[in-house]
Image (cartoon, rainbow, N blue to C red):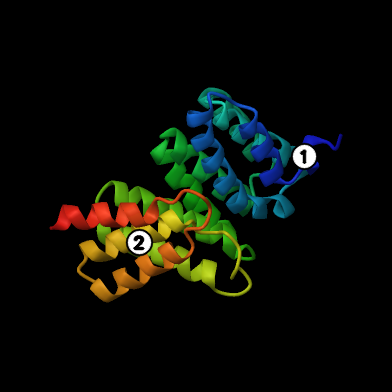
Amino acid sequence: MAPLSTLPLALALAAAAAAKSPAGREHSRASDAARAAMRDEAAAPHASPRAIAHYLRARVALVRGDEQEALREMDLAMAFDPSSAGLRAGAADLLLAIGEVGRAAGEAHRAIDLAEREPDAAARGHAVLGRIAAAESRWPAAAAELDAAARLADAPPTAGAVAVSQEDRFVLGVALEALRRWDDAATAFARAASGDDDGIGALSLLRQAHALTRA
């Protein structure tokens, strides 16, 4: 069997998530982990093998619900490769999932600062900052960060990579709607819906529910 540090992130996390039960709860975790893994796979070429190994263990620990172990392994990953923008972006995503909002924002800013040659990592950093701002109803900041993430994700050489989730594009639409930028919001919602093919089937329902809150 290949060493853990050489396994693709998506494969390792999908295998770990698929092994869990009960099916309902773990299916949701597996879906979240798979989408996160697709975004995080870009981190691997820009980090040392030892850092990647600890990062993978952190993601697997998160899937298993062991947040303390996830934090410990994530800290070790950062210690082995503090200059990796991809790992910093992955850390920001993981920390936000755990609820460590302040640390998540810090890692997102570091990812952006380090990402001169890693536009994918910068996009993911902006996405984390946008999610934080949206959760706090800071709509101008949310729109600015998520729009920056989407633009980086859609521009060469990142175009086509899964750097910004469809959920992030949906939240961008919500932020733009809150700012009464109706045309821009409609475009963001359309982009989110056009990519809703990963099996979650929720974006159109979320859009309808959001429309009802404005009625």
Q: Which residue is mark 1?
A: 5
- What kind of residue is marked 1? Ser
Q: Which residue is located at x 67 percent, y 46 percent?
A: 10
Disc number placed over residue 172 in the picture, else none: 2
Q: Earlier in the sequence, mark 2 or mark 1?
A: 1
Residues packed near mark 1 inside 10 Å, few (<14), some (14 to 19) or many (20 plus): some
SS class, disc 2: helix
Cα distance, mark 2 to mark 1? Answer: 34 Å
Q: Which residue is located at x 17 percent, y 52 percent?
A: 213
Q: Which residue is located at x 42 percent, y 54 percent?
A: 167
Residue 71 horizontal side relative to residue 128, left or right: right
Q: Which-is-in-front pick, marks 2 and 1? A: 2
192 or 108: nearer the eye? 192
55 or 184: nearer the eye? 184
Q: Which residue is located at x 51 percent, y 68 percent?
A: 152
Q: Is residue 115 visible?
A: no
